[in-house]
Image (cartoon, helix red, strand yellow):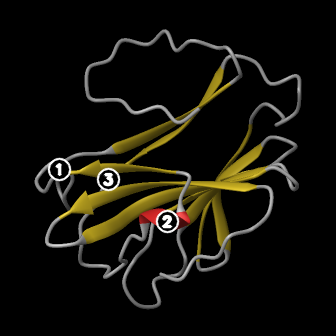
Amino acid sequence: MKLRAVAGEQKYAVAIQNRGLWLTMWVRCSSPKGQIFIMYPRAGDAGNPHASYHEKGRFHQKSYDRAMLPQQRQSLTADFKDSEHLGIYYGHGTSTGAVCDPNMFDGVVILDPGILGPRNGSVGFDLLAPGYEATWERHCRTFLFR
């Protein structure tokens, strides 16, 4: 995947280390537009699947230019409080051929082979307000990007 640096954006990746570094998911936070995108690369022309959270609080999944499961959440403004859960994503692997260049990201979580796969392991995302401390029980390994 060819990513480019955009002023005012932050990017965070989840990658699998397996004879190279393979991108399995990434998050793009766009400050100027007040949007957050959770990207899950797929091989070939697989419809550009992603989830997006927009400034006015609209959250949905999208693939093949069709929005699904729309929900209204908190607005991404100074009034944002506590947290919003943005999903748990399964179906990971290295078959997409998406090479991860750590230099293109503000942070990368690198996992060993076998932790995430097509049928095992998941990645969950929660958006936290500044200063908010997560209070959920941790039944599995959790990584927080702040």
Tag 2: amino acid = Asn
Q: Is residue 77 visible in the rendered structure shown here?
A: yes
Circle 2/circle 3 CB separation < 8 Å? no
Side of 12 where 5 appears, left or right: right
The disc at residue 24 is none
Q: Quadrant of residue 16?
A: bottom left
The disc at residue 90 is 3
Query: What's the distance in space between the residues labelled 2 and 1, CA to CA?
Result: 28 Å
Q: Residue at x 43, y 60 (%)?
A: 25
Residue farthest to the bottom, as pictured: 44
The kind of secondary structure element at disc 3 is loop
Label 2 vs 1, first from the N-terminus = 2
Looking at the rendered image, the quarter that the C terminus falls into is: top right
The disc at residue 103 is 2
Front residue of this view, candidates 4 and 43: 4
Label 1 vs 3, first from the N-terminus = 3
| Residue 60, image x, y percentages | 66, 53
- Disc tally is 3
Label 2 vs 3, first from the N-terminus = 3
Q: Residue at x 53, y 36 (%)?
A: 145
Q: Quadrant of residue 95?
A: bottom left
Query: What's the distance in space between the residues labelled 1 and 3, CA to CA?
Result: 7 Å
Mark 2 or 3, closer to the camera: 2
Above or below, comparing residue 50 to residue 46 in the picture: above
Circle 1/circle 3 CB separation < 8 Å? no
Tag 3: amino acid = Tyr
| Residue 120, image x, y percentages | 17, 50
Above or below, comparing residue 13 to residue 87 in the picture: below
The kind of secondary structure element at disc 2 is helix
Residue at the spot of label 1: 120
Mark 2 or 1, closer to the camera: 2
